[in-house]
Image (tube, grey):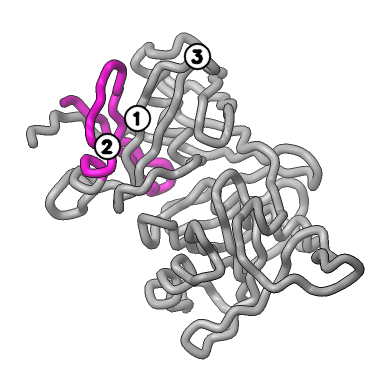
Amino acid sequence: MKFTKLQATGNDFILIYARNMELDWPKLARDMCHRHCGIGADGLLLVIPSNAADLKMRMFNPDGSEAEVCGNGLRCFAKYVIDRGIAARQNLTVETIVGTRTIQASIAQGKVSHAKVNMGMPRFRAEDIPVLMEKQQKGRGEVDITYISDYPLTIDKRKLALSFVSMGNPHAVSFLSQPVADFPLSEIGPQVENHPIFPERVNFEIARVLNRNKIEARVWERGAGETLSCGSGTCAIAVITRLKGHTDNEVDIILPGGNLTINWDGVGEVYLSGPVEEVFSGEWLK
């Protein structure tokens, strides 16, 4: 079976053109994504024909679970299908579990070098994320806030203030005053991901606002662990900082794998932009 590995700011994926293929995708994702016994990746992406868009993308995490959407994965997806002529144009529509996403690809020397993804509208209701929490009693017992901000959660005696948003998948963002490199993400991340208040688990981001146009961040991804970059995670960070009034509409987010640019006007759809590269192609023999 032929595959290609791509990376977008260090977030790496295995792509397979899965037309007319039916396999045990969760098991294959676990095997192929394994860093030592497989190819090694943050996820397995399938390119599938679609009746609702130009193409359909399915994404499986290294633990075999299927993700609703993946921003960096969509950028890799665009490069894969455009460079190979599977898609005939630079502006794509891609079907995902949570709806159709549009991608605008930039070409350099005949290949896709960057891609901009419309990540859709952020959602803030507890049931949309989802998160189980005690509601603040006011009036009929509804939460008297537009979005859930600075929700207190204590992990290993460390007090976290979490803000929640769904970008089609669930995110919990915690803001720090110290450099993100100093945070024990490998210890705290899995406990937040699997905390009982998150019935479908959660992606956990830590971020520090440097100025109105720049943020540094790290991400613990649901089903994958810490990754060098996360597209939907950076969108979640940018949305929350914009709502808090700490950043402008456009913000650069510095991640261990590189920089991503997020645009959000505070009311509409969120846009994710960044570079994308092909790493290598091969054949899976198992």
Q: Is residue 177 visible?
A: no
Q: Is label 1 in a helix, a strand or a loop?
A: strand
The amino acid at mark 3 is: Asn
Residue that sits furthest to the right in the current view: 139
> Are the two marked residues, 2 and 1, in contact with CB atoms closer than 8 angstroms?
yes
Dot 1 amino acid type = Leu
Q: Is residue 18 magenta?
A: yes
- Camera-nearest label, 2 or 1: 2
Question: Is 87 situated above or below 77?
Answer: above
**Is residue 216 placed above or below 96 in the rendered structure?**
below
Q: Which residue is mark 3?
A: 51
Determine whether the residue tagged by mark 2 lies in a helix, strand or loop: helix
Which residue is drawn at the image coordinates 76% and 47% (left, top)?
A: 249
* Position of residue 16 measured from the top left corner of the image (x, y, whole percent): 28, 28
Mark 1 = which residue? 46
Mark 2–mark 3 contact, CB under 8 Å?
no
Separation of disc 3 and disc 1 at Cα? 16 Å
Q: Which residues are magenta?
A: 1-29
Dots 3 and 1: beta carbons under 8 Å?
no
Q: Judge left or right: residue 250 versus residue 45.
A: right
The residue where tag 2 is placed is: 25
Q: Position of residue 82 (x, y in %)?
A: 42, 18
Horizontal and vertical percent position of residue 252: 62, 51
